[in-house]
Image (cartoon, rainbow, N blue to C red):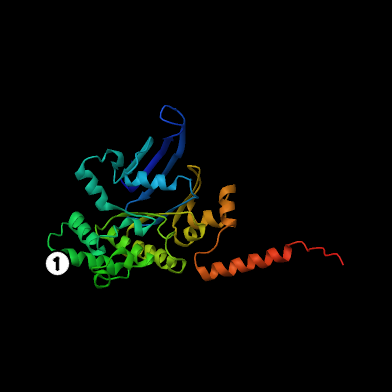
Amino acid sequence: MSGENLLELDNVSKFFPIGGFFSRARMTAVNEVSFALETGRPEIFTIVGESGSGKSTLAKMILGSETADRGTIRFDGADVAGMRSRGAREAFMTRVQPVFQNPFEAFNPLTRIDEYLFSTAHRFKGAKNRADREALTDVALQRVGLSLAEIRGRYSHELSGGQLQRVAIARALIPEPKLIVADEPVSMVDASLRMSIVNLFRELRDTLKVSIIYITHDLATAYYIADRVIIMRKGVVVESGDARTVLDNPQHEYSIALKNAVLPPDPHDASAIIRERQQDAGASAPRKIVSA
């Protein structure tokens, strides 16, 4: 393990049993995936793949909620699978924070949103009094374009999906992590607000120097946001490298098919392309023969 790597995956594989309790059959969810993120070089590393490609399973292993069956995952030189004690897990989660797909599932609808953030400030930053918790919470909210005054005393159903996902990101920022793992963070957000969330991740990379593993099925978003990219299919990395190089000129047939189906993340641009494709389809459609 190089001391220059913040995160390193070395031939990581994950299997799940299929066919019942006594069956030896198993499904390969992730197959020998390797990559590394360098310390001191913040980037957005994007994992692209359709449902069932293994990308979310990979995210769970990086976060330590799933254990690799083969290979190793190291964060700052330490094996993630070996972080079993409460103290080790707390130290790890201070530096590695998740942002999940559905913000409405991340918050209990019966608990005020601000209490979640105050609890995070107390747990990870040791903020013992309310003034300190509020100050840390407001700083984090300001970084995502909100404020404590806007969300104080409110519940999740009182916020839009976009607002709530920003709150989830703010919560992840409170511990001042070095790595954020964002699993499909805009798929449940209204299309008109997705770009604001995507741009927010770029700002966090640039201003806070935090690395982000951004997981998506959307090649257009990957092209827009990624510094580096891997494309997964059925648990296997089929292409990897600099995002522009890979996505401008994909080599694998699966990557080519994804590119051909892609729409840009901006809804106005996407609508224009859809209209063009519809016009092209209409022009190339065979004429109906109508008998006189």
Whole-percent x, y for residue 158 in the image? 32, 68
Quick one: quadrant of the C terminus? bottom right
Horizontal relation, residue 194 to residue 268: left or right? left
Total marks shown come to: 1
Instruction: Decide which of 209, 138 is in the foreground and name it.
Output: 138
Q: Note whether residue 208 is visible.
A: no
Examine the rendered structure and indicate whether residue 157 appears above or below residue 252: below
Residue found at x 51% / y 60%: 220
Q: Note whether residue 197 is visible.
A: yes
Whole-percent x, y for residue 97 in the image? 30, 53
Instruction: Decide which of 211, 63 is in the foreground and name it.
Output: 63
Quarter occupied by residue 135: bottom left
Instruction: Decide which of 20, 116 is in the foreground and name it.
Output: 20
Examine the rendered structure and indicate whether residue 136 appears above or below residue 149: above
Under mark 1, the amino acid is Ala
Examine the rendered structure and indicate whether residue 158 appears above or below residue 227: below
Quick one: quadrant of the N terminus? top left
- Pointer 1 residue: 131
Quarter occupied by residue 249: bottom right
Quarter occupied by residue 74: top left
Residue found at x 64% / y 64%: 277
Residue found at x 26% / y 41%: 83
Whole-percent x, y for residue 60 in the image? 36, 46
